[in-house]
Amino acid sequence: MSSTPVPDITLNNGATIPQLGFGVFQVENDEATTAVATALEVGYRSIDTAAVYGNEAGVGRALAASSVPRAELFVTTKLWNTAQGYDSTLVAFDESVGKLGLDYVDMYLIHWPTPNRDRYLDTWRAFEKLLADGRVRTIGVSNFQPDHLTRLLEHTAVVPSVNQVELHPYLQQGKVRGYDRAHAIATEAWSPLGQGGELLEDPVITEVARAHGRSAAQVVLRWHLQLGNIVIPKSVTPTRIRENFEVFDFELTTAELDAINALDRGGRIGPDPDTFNQG
Ligand code: NAD
């Protein structure tokens, strides 16, 4: 497939990222190869992995085997917490691109701020060097709260292009999204489907899904897209991989968006970035 229905989002340094991508958290190497191959066949062009997922090599094998030109792909990986610091970041980056089998990655993210470690400023300076050296197209952060971003902006030169955070109808992240918007940082939603839990059975979501003849997952993805979020849903099931991509031929009404907006309840699934210092 050479054309794609997925809109591009232009980032603050002029790079573009597909608004819908494919995540591979908790997918081991061989399964990642199969899942990414299916995603590329379906039409996804953006793949989100991380050093700590342990599947960069598996992702890389699918990229190498695909006929999609490198320039059409958008590959994101993330620096794990234990590698934070200037020199250790440069070493970890080389390991990641080596496993992926790439010369450059499209986006490199600091996975967590880990505030007790207090190394994200030095880590970011290494990210700035990777950007200046042309080894990454754009650099960003993940799980950064406004306080962490404020400190980063005060002490470093390049404004992150993306902040990837847990975000779904039960955790709408109004404060983080507002901060990101005010600083020209794009917000990317991880666990956009709430990891497929009770969110997909919420009566508000299933009622909207019924009205459109769509699945609950498609309605949640549509909500993200209409809000302007970048999304990276995960699945290893081919029918779901395809279903999650078929979200560009219907629209939610303002009333439906409002009904989903009203589901916000601070329902965090993953760790709290202010207190997560592991790794
Ligand atoms: P998700 O919200 O994408 O949910 C994935 C789960 O939802 C699947 O395992 C499956 O059980 C279910 N599902 C998927 N499609 C479905 C469908 N069409 N119908 C019914 N159920 C469906 O959760 P996630 O994997 O945690 O997040 C997505 C991606 O975000 C990850 O793969 C990873 O790339 C990224 N992520 C990043 C961080 C971070 O700290 N930066 C943390 C978690 C995840």
Image: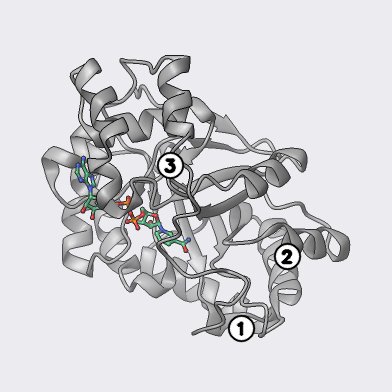
Q: Residue at x 31, y 38 (%)?
A: 68
Q: Nearer the viewer, mark 1 or mark 3?
A: 3
Report x, y in % for residue 119: 70, 80
Report helix, strand or loop for mark 1: helix
Disc 3 residue type (three-letter)? Pro
Q: Quadrant of the N terminus?
A: top left
Depth check, front residue: 12 or 210:
210
Q: Residue at x 31, y 58 (%)?
A: 24
Counting residues from the N terminus, which is met first, the one under dot 1 or under dot 3? 1
Vertical relation: 46 (above or below) 160: above
Q: Residue at x 24, y 54 (%)?
A: 62
Does mark 3 have its CB less than 8 Å from ligand 1? Answer: no
Q: Residue at x 75, y 63 (%)?
A: 147
- Residue 189 left/right relative to 212: right
Q: Which residue is mark 3?
A: 169
Report x, y in % for residue 175: 67, 47
Disc 1 residue type (three-letter)? Ser
Q: Which residue is mark 2?
A: 148
Task: Report, in whole angstroms, how far the alpha carbon at label 1 lies from the one at label 3.
Answer: 37 Å
Q: Which image quadrant for residue 251? A: top left
Report helix, strand or loop for mark 3: loop
Q: Which residue is mark 1?
A: 88
